[in-house]
Amino acid sequence: MNTTVIDSVAVGAQADLVLELGRRARAASRLLMKAPDSAKSAALRFMAQELEQSKEALQAENAKDLEAARRNNLEPSLVDRLTLSDKALATMATGLRQIADMPDPVGSQSSSIVRPNGMRVGQMRVPLGVIGIIYESRPNVTIDAAALCLKSGNATILRGGSEAFHSNQALGRIIRAGLQAANLPQDAVQVVSTTDRAVVGHLVTLTDYIDVIIPRGGKGLIQRLAAEAKVPLLKHLDGNCHVYIDSSANLDKAHDITLNAKTYRYGICGTMETLLVHADVAPTILPRLAASFDARGVELRGCERTCALLPQARRATDEDWATEYLGPVLAVRIVDDIEQAMDHIARWSSGHTESIITESLEAATRFQREVDSSSVYVNLPTCFADGFEYGLGAEIGISTNRLHARGPVGLEGLTTYKWVLTGDGQLRG
């Protein structure tokens, strides 16, 4: 079956079409629940092979989106996310194969307990059901989301942004080919083609057919969906990430980690946006870091003590501490101790990813125990916040929720459980 195309038609007709997407997805989800892992994994390996063999055709379609993005003055960070480079395609193919090789979570059981009457009680992993994914600017999400949902036994409806229209349709054809090759239901992954925002409004209220909505995009999209959705959301909010250089840090290590955390890629949610530096090491490390950042065109905005030490830094405001820049701007604050650093993070962080650079086991342990973000690192750059880097194969998003999943959401995060009890005729007295 071809990708479902939704034209700009009357709102009522759009609602009917979205309802049909949901019905087909629900029917496909029932078939996926009993699909063998061999078929799901075969589909993913087929997709990986097709990505590699169709690289030129994919990049030709992607070039149409990139041309439109530049014509519409899309922000550089969004253009970066939109680009299907050789590296991006290779990473997607590798991720598909990693997911294919992973154990199928569906049907796995936790350790059971035996009650005094001999009844055995356990839990079994099961798919969530039907997942709607709404995303902007990142065509790699089309492959990552399809792969993770398929492997975890979930049907999915994918609604990408208009800026990635051609890229997403080309990737959708590869997904369909993989499903067909493995004799899996074609409606297991449906790529919606529309630029009409009204369709999104219908998707997020389709409670009879969609079990969870996962939005991946800017703050505006998340806020809109949070206000309109009746289907539960698994939200991915801002990546206002912090690195704290402790008084015990190895300064060579601190320099390299901090530089990587900010300049690896500006447009990803794991990019460091605020640097916190202990006052004892600030006079030594900050001028060195400032020179390295200046060479890479990064603007510094600092607290009063930072500006006194670095004349080129602009004075930071509360807005700077709260901002996910997604660009070559970095906020810097000098703190007196780890307590003050953690207080700053508690006040301004979006709960995404934080890191401490330290040689003190006590400081590292305390930081990881007390900082309440979805990922907390020791001696690593925050740009490792990525499902591929965590060994998950890919991620459906990085959840800043506490329920139902947190951090990079891989296969297990796309399942829930049911209680399974086994007995031999016991009766309740």
Image (spheres, helix red, strand yellow):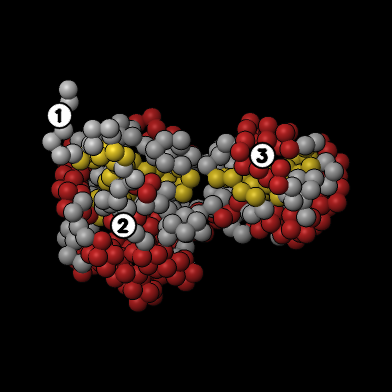
Distance in Å between CA atoms under marks 2 and 1: 35 Å
Quadrant of the image occupied by residue 41: bottom left
Q: Which residue lies furthest to the left in this view?
A: 425
> Residue type at mark 2?
Asp
Image point (20%, 69%), residue name = 181
Classify mark 2: helix, strand or loop. Answer: loop
Distance in Å between CA atoms under marks 1 and 3: 50 Å
Image point (17%, 22%), residue name = 429
Give percent across and percent down for residue 138.
Answer: 43, 55
Which-is-in-front pick, marks 2 and 1? 1
Classify mark 3: helix, strand or loop. Answer: helix
> Residue type at mark 3?
Arg
In this view of the protein, which residue sits in the foreground, 160 or 345? 345
Q: Is residue 264 above or below residue 280?
A: below
Query: Is there any visible trace of residue 124 in the rendered image?
Result: yes
Q: In this view, does 91 lie to the left or right of 115?
A: right
- Residue position for label 1: 427
- Residue position for label 3: 366
In this view of the protein, which residue sits in the foreground, 429 or 323? 429
In this view of the protein, which residue sits in the foreground, 69 or 412? 412
**Mark positioned earlier in the residue sequence (1 or 3):** 3
